[in-house]
Image: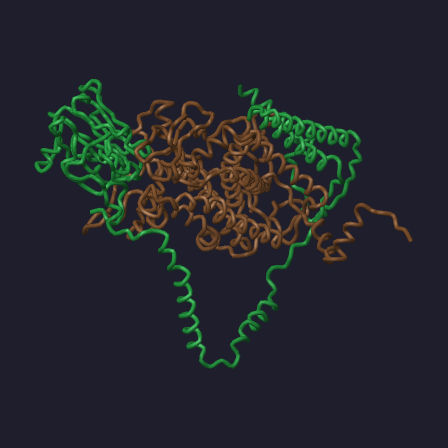
Chain colours: A green, B brown
């Protein structure tokens, strides 16, 4: 394998040497020597190769048109168009290296700094202020005008979006709101076993609203650890959290649930964007990953028809954090 | 009196008579390009940009920049009857129904990937050869700006199609925008016209940004970049007859014109072949985006890998006190990290002048990386830093393909971010010093010492080849 690689490198070196016609690793010649030269290749064979490549490109281009007309596969279109371009490239490169005169020229660089002229240009610039006595007043007035015009240009940007106010924290969840699935069917507690994981929305609300989607999971009630004020939020082991990750706003669409309690990791709600992991059994706390705060929890209740309803609003603003999050 | 027609002289005469352009033409013909393969990297970026404009114009004619939802009735059976935005549906139509549409779309995507890769490698070439030194600081700043804009432009294009990957990316972009301390909420609300996923105005804004604003700025900067190069001329490596005051190489006409045109077609050929033969961003597999959906193992285009890596490796810190979240977590990985990276890049010419070389002279002859070991070491350390973060962004793929536990990897990368750069910098410094001392090329020449046996039977090492540079 390594020998093969070595041979390949040697082959590339030989091809390079043949194409460019010079050796490598020779001592650097004197910098003073004039490198200018002009060679006329007069290579009839190279001309024939260029002509052949160009004709090949024309043929590939015709093939592309034919394939386009018969509505052929993308791969055939790409292959023929790519081949036409590649053959034109090869023709031009061979022509550049083997057909046209090979010229090396020396060009003097432009002078960038003009010591006399810079001084004179600065004087010319300064001469505009000749005879002006109230320079500071003019500068201040001009500055004020510029700032004012800048404000005129910038202020309309405010029309681009509404004022933040409370919009970023809003959520359609209210006490008594029915939980429905993607097809607007109510979630019935008897349809969901322990270990279940479903996405739910407030009935009748805009599903695309960041405050809408929640994940509902059913856990063993004995494993749930909620603070006293949230004790009633998890009837029959059902807990619900905002589905929008508090880190970067992706959907927390993965649920890790232990198949074998003694060796598996504890249940986790995972966002696949940056793998923030939240503990559904203890108020959505962050157990791994970059999220800086728990998932907002939705208090649940079971109504007389054994359907899940919200028992209140989300416990915190949904979605990624900003200035307004406490 | 009849004159014989001359197919070359006549057009030149026509132009000169009207514009007086013959002297300019002669000067252009004799404009000299120094020869080195690494000078072609920037040309790859330039020609990818040309292909991007060409293919982008074509696909923009079929694209509907609207989040208005409709039911899909195209030829891709699995999505029949699904509701999706016009942006997604029109991209599906472009991919399945428009002849050559998929070729154009995939070529456009590949060209974007190559465009940014070429800029990155070109920036590295300019950095490690010291080509950014006086008088070229301005062009360095323009180049770094184009890199930043190209990354943003690539992200906008990738976001436009409104598939699942776009939506996940935009959600993260929104979280990063909203994380700006103090004003983030208002900034994000202005950009999206409300809270994510934004109002109906958002898609046209994204579209105008991608097809007009950023390309126009990029095209202007490219023009400026090239105009400054023409004024200052290319740098060159030291060699026979080459001085600080001249340029030695191939004149534009005919050799270089043919060569660079050939290079353009070669770049175009590779991009079209990739676009035709190698599938990229198959949006029909991901499906349309809804804010409550996401998928595991999602990876962005390569040029965003360093940002997703930074977001993923950041520990769960959030500065929260006095009733406000002062610094939300995505700020660190999504804004602070790239700002530090680009800040260092922008300032490097002046940092080097002040702290590394104390050299403010004009330089037209390039350094080899070994000629300035400290610069090369710092560059290698910086590159290592960004690369470690980049690889961290692929930790989930590493878990799936090799099986290293994800959480262990993140801890490894958190530590490696700080350990690897200085180690690589030190090794690079030592390697540069060694190369300087031996004056040997690591790959091309004999690297050992000849040993001669003396008549008495002992062994004597011959002096090293090459002469050490002062």
Q: Nearer the viewer, residue A176 or B116?
A: A176
Q: Nearer the viewer, residue B24 or B292?
A: B292
In the image, taking residue A255 as reference, residue B413 lies left or right, namely right
In the image, taking residue A69 as reference, residue B158 lies left or right, namely left
Q: Is residue B260 above or below residue A3?
A: below
Image position, residue B324 (x, y; %): 22, 50
Q: Is residue B419 above or below residue B244?
A: above
Q: Is residue B91 above or below residue B365?
A: above
Image position, residue B349 (x, y; %): 48, 52
In the image, taking residue B216 as reference, residue A246 lies left or right, namely left
Q: Look at 55% across and 28% down and name the residue there.
A: B276
Image position, residue B365 (x, y; %): 59, 49
Q: Look at 54% across and 51% down and name the residue there.
A: B220
Considering every residue shown, the one lying at the far right of the view is: B1
Q: Quadrant of residue B308?
A: top left
Q: Quadrant of residue B36?
A: top right
Image position, residue B107 (x, y; %): 54, 33
Q: How many marks?
A: 0
Q: Is residue B411 visible?
A: no
Q: Is residue A64 visible?
A: yes
Considering every residue shown, the one lying at the far left of the view is: A228
Q: Nearer the viewer, residue A149 or B443?
A: A149
């Amino acid at each position: 394998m390594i020998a093969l690689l070595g041979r390949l490198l040697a082959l590339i070196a030989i091809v390079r040497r043949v194409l460019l016609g010079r050796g490598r690793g020779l001592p650097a010649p004197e910098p003073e020597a004039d490198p200018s030269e002009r060679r006329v290749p007069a290579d009839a064979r190279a001309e024939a190769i260029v002509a052949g490549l160009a004709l090949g490109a024309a043929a590939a281009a015709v093939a592309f048109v034919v394939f386009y007309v018969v509505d052929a596969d993308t791969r055939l279109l790409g292959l023929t168009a790519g081949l036409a371009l590649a053959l034109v490239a090869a023709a031009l490169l061979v022509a550049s290296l083997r057909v046209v005169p090979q010229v090396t020229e020396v060009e003097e660089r432009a002078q960038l700094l003009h010591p006399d002229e810079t001084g004179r240009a600065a004087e010319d610039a300064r001469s505009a202020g000749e005879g002006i006595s109230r320079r500071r007043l003019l500068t201040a007035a001009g500055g004020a005008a510029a700032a004012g015009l800048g404000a005129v240009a910038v202020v309309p940007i405010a029309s681009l979006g509404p004022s933040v106010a409370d919009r970023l924290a809003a959520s359609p969840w209210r006490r008594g709101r029915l939980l429905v699935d993607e097809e607007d069917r109510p979630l019935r507690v008897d349809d969901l076993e322990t270990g279940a994981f479903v996405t739910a929305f407030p009935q009748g609300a805009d599903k695309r609203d960041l405050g809408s989607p929640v994940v509902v999971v059913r856990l063993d009630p004995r494993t749930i650890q909620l603070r006293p004020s949230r004790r009633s939020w998890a009837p029959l082991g059902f807990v619900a959290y905002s589905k929008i990750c508090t880190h970067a706003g992706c959907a927390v669409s993965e649920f890790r649930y232990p198949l074998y309690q003694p060796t598996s990791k504890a249940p986790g709600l995972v966002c696949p964007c940056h793998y923030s992991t939240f503990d559904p059994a203890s108020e959505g706390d962050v157990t791994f990953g970059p999220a800086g705060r728990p998932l907002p929890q939705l208090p649940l209740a079971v109504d007389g028809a054994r359907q899940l309803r919200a028992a209140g609003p989300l416990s915190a603003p949904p979605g990624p954090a900003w200035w307004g999050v406490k | 009196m009849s004159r014989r027609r001359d197919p070359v002289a006549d057009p030149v005469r026509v132009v000169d008579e009207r514009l007086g352009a013959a002297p300019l033409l002669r000067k252009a013909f004799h404009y000299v390009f120094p020869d080195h393969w690494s000078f072609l990297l920037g040309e790859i970026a330039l020609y990818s940009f040309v292909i991007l404009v060409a293919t982008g114009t074509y696909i923009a004619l079929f694209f509907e920049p609207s989040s208005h939802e409709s039911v899909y009735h195209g030829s891709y059976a699995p999505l029949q009857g699904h509701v999706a935005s016009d942006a997604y549906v029109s991209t599906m139509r472009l991919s399945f129904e428009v002849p050559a549409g998929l070729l154009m779309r995939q070529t456009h995507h590949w060209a974007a990937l190559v465009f940014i890769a070429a800029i990155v490698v070109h920036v590295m070439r300019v950095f490690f050869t010291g080509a950014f030194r006086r008088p070229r600081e301005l062009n360095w700043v323009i180049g770094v700006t184009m890199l930043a804009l190209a990354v943003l432009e690539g992200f906008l294009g990738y976001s436009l199609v409104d598939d699942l990957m776009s939506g996940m990316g935009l959600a993260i972009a929104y979280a990063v925008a909203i994380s700006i301390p103090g004003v983030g909420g208002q900034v994000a609300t202005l950009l999206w016209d409300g809270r994510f996923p934004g109002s109906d105005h958002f898609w046209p804004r994204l579209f105008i940004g991608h097809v007009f604003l950023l390309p126009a700025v990029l095209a202007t900067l490219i023009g400026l970049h090239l105009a400054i190069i023409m004024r200052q001329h290319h740098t060159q490596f030291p060699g026979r007859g080459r001085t600080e005051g001249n340029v030695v190489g191939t004149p534009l006409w005919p050799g270089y014109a043919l060569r660079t045109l050939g290079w353009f077609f070669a770049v175009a050929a590779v991009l079209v072949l990739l676009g035709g033969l190698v599938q990229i961003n198959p949006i029909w597999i991901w499906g349309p985006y809804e804010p409550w959906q996401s998928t595991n193992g999602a990876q962005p285009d390569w040029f965003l890998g360093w940002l997703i890596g930074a977001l993923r490796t950041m520990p769960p810190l959030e500065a929260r006190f006095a009733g406000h979240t002062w610094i939300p977590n995505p700020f660190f990985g999504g804004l602070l990290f790239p700002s530090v990276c680009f800040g260092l890049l922008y300032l490097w010419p002046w940092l080097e002048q002040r702290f590394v070389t104390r050299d403010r002279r004009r330089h037209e002859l390039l350094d080899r990386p070994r000629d300035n070991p400290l610069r090369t070491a710092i560059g290698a350390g910086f590159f290592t830093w960004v690369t470690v973060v980049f690889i961290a962004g692929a930790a989930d793929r590493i878990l799936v393909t090799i099986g290293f536990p994800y959480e262990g990897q993140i801890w490894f990368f958190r530590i490696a971010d700080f350990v690897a750069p200085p180690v690589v910098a030190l090794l690079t410094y030592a390697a540069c010093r060694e190369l300087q001392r031996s004056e040997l090329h690591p790959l091309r020449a004999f690297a050992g010492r000849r040993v001669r046996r003396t008549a008495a039977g002992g062994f004597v090492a011959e002096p090293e080849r090459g002469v050490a540079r002062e």
